[in-house]
Image: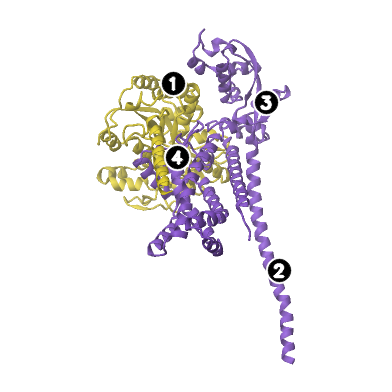
Chain colours: A yellow, B purple
Amino acid sequence: MNLHNTKFAAVAGALFIAAAAHAQSARDQISIVGSSTVYPFATVVAERFGQTTSFKTPKIESTGSGGGMKLFCNGLGVEYADITNSSRRMKASEYKTCQENGVTDIIEVLIGYDGIALANAIDSELFDISRKDLFLALAKQVPNPDGSETFVDNPYTRWSDVNEDLPDAKIEVLGPPPTSGTRDAFAELALEGGCSEIEWIEALEKSDKDQFKAVCHTVREDGLFIEAGENDNLIVQKLEANPNALGIFGFSFLDQNSDIVQASMIDGFEPTFESIADGSYPISRPLYFYVKKAHIGVIPGIKEYLDEFTSEAAWGEEGYLADKGMISLGEDIRSEAAESIGNLENMPVLEDK
Amino acid sequence: MNDQRNTTEIVQASIKRRYAKEKRFRLYGLIAIISSLAFLAMLITTITIRGLPAFTQNFIQLDITLDQKTLGLGDEPDISALRKANYNGTIKNSLLAEFPDVTKRKDKKLLYKLVSKGGQYDLQKKVMADPELIGESMTVWLPVGDDVHTYLKGDVDITLPEKKRRFKDIQVGWIDSLQENGQIAKRFNKTFFESGDSREPELAGIRGALFGSMLTLVVTLALSFPVAVAAALYLEEFAPKNRWTDLIEVNINNLAAVPSIVFGLLGLAVFINFFHLPRSAPLVGGLVLSLMTLPTIIISSRAALKSVPPSIRDAALGLGASNLQVVFHHVLPLAMPGILTGTIIGMAQALGETAPLLMIGMVAFIVDVPTAITDPATVLPVQIFQWADLPEKGFVEKTSAAIMVLLAFLIVMNALAVYLRKKFERKW
């Protein structure tokens, strides 16, 4: 009985390992990880790729940009991801990790832009606000209103306190929590952008970088900025119910809900496909993905996936990614990029500044 | 004499009070049951009302000409050319033929949205099955787009000003005229049960997640049930009672209360990073979930084994049975109903987990339906979570429908447990 049991366990164990090893050596499906901002676009391409070619549909995990880079740079081989999506450019430190782990040849693809909208309910008054006013209204610490070069806890509670031209309404902004990439981008592009318009704070960037970051990136915590969770649908619904509130979310949600919410003008520009593409709307960020060159030819379909993603039908101005709310690159940049990607050119070496 | 009568009187008087107390207590119990039933009914009704439209799909009847030029095919197209052909173009042509007065670019874009993006894949399948169709004209029923489906199920308030809704007057006109001609039909939504995930709400199906859940649970059950029952049997029937077994018992009880994400991290470190098992596979998901359900099954199995009367053991031993025979012939069969109940509770818990699966890559967009335990897969609760997060409104009903499927799965599992319990149950 005992002997029999041991034998059985040994056979079961061996089978188990064999099955796993088989699965590893024979991965025939592209594995993609990375940003949750790129996820809704990458999934559309992947689905179409699966339908129109003989390859399997790629598997896409939404791990966040940083988490994706970590999985991507872990090494070469079938157990590591082939492609990572990112809502920012690869950092020099991440590039170094990649190189150290043998991931030396990487193709970088800039696919388009994502705008971040500040919006309120469609029946409410339209906001026309500058980044400086946004900073003054939302930062935790702001310059002392008496004009001295010191910081005080944000004293403003109404938009009209910040700037007389703004509506006389309570400041109430719904936004994503600090774990979200949208929040990072908002802090960096909107708040820091407004922050640097105040001269003596900009000077601080050179003398005391840490304090500059702390001041410009920290959002107020006294209840006027409300963390509404990662789900952008929820923010849109809350705006509909509360006409006094403003919300921060991605452009694709604005596009899908144009019957419920309207976007505020920032520095005089409304977020539209055109204004984000030409860079005049200030709060937008680039979307990238990175491909391991060594995996091309090992995992079937990577080259074809690249071709599908960079085809006019996908990332063009009239392409299906634009239908989902992605902002296309300019035509020249697209054709140039498509060519260098077609030749599988390596990305430039990233080094610490 | 006087005293005694007094006691009787006191008791007599208190009887009424005591009965009232009991009545009140029963009433509280009844209120508790009714209110929990009301909550349950409310939950199920909202989910059903929201989810039901997902089980039907509307179709548009169109005359399609599969001409070579629009499809962009040569004379002898190979398979990959057939796969890539411009089926969407033929659908667009047929829509323009149906409504010839649409000329503005913006209106054309709206018109093309009447038919779902899945329509071209339907045509693709037809042509690939029979390439002779190229050049022919045919009448087909194609699924409608997301916005049209929302309108047809009555969720668009057309009394609102046009600016405030996604569905415009011109679209309402097209749909009304199609309806008059009988070119719109409502049918059972087979796609929902036959396909995997999709980014288009009208094409998204539950099959991938359902199969993923089944495969994961099979692995979980196959690993955790034998190990847990053997552990419980050893601890309860054979192990000496000393400090070591006490320590083990305390640890098992503690493990039952550990947050599930911890098991996910463990799974990532051990199964994926050390043993190099594939990410996103039901195999790893099942391994992680069986770690999580083991303590639950062990604890309930031990309780079931304890409740078997000692007289049964004594009688068997008295008749000369060995210890092993006592356990396998008498104690285990009698404890089986209790063990099965514990197992089902554990499995139901495993069915609803998402947190540990996040770490091992099962929270992912996967279109192909998994067929083996090493294929990438996702599970039902993850699918619900992902659909709830997407911007398209059509996913609201899909989310509720997926919840209904999850509930049905649970009911089937529980029914099976009840049946097995009845089969093994013995009364004395």
Direction from residue B63 to residue A118 in the image, left or right: left
Judge depth for marks 1 and 4 and give the one in front: 4
Residue A309, x across and y down, in percent: 43, 24
Q: Nearer the viewer, residue B287 or A172?
A: B287
Q: Amino acid at mark 3?
A: Ile
Direction from residue A190 to residue A345 in the image, left or right: left
Are dots 3 and 4 in contact, CB under 8 Å?
Answer: no
Judge depth for marks 3 and 1 and give the one in front: 1
Disc 1: which chain?
A: A
Residues flagged by tags 2 and 1 on a common chain: no
- Would you call the spot at circle 4 few (<14 residues within 10 Å), some (14-19), or many (20 or more)? many
Disc 2: which chain?
A: B
Label 1, on which residue? A311
Residues under labels 4 and 2: Cα distance?
54 Å
Label 2, on which residue? B23
Residues under labels 1 and 4: Cα distance?
37 Å
Disc 3: which chain?
A: B
Q: Nearer the viewer, residue A173 or B203?
A: B203
Determine which of the numbered discs, if any, sits on residue B283 in the image.
4
Disc 4: which chain?
A: B
Q: In which quadrant will I find the N terminus of chain B? A: bottom right
Choose the circle earlier in sequence order: 3 or 4: 3
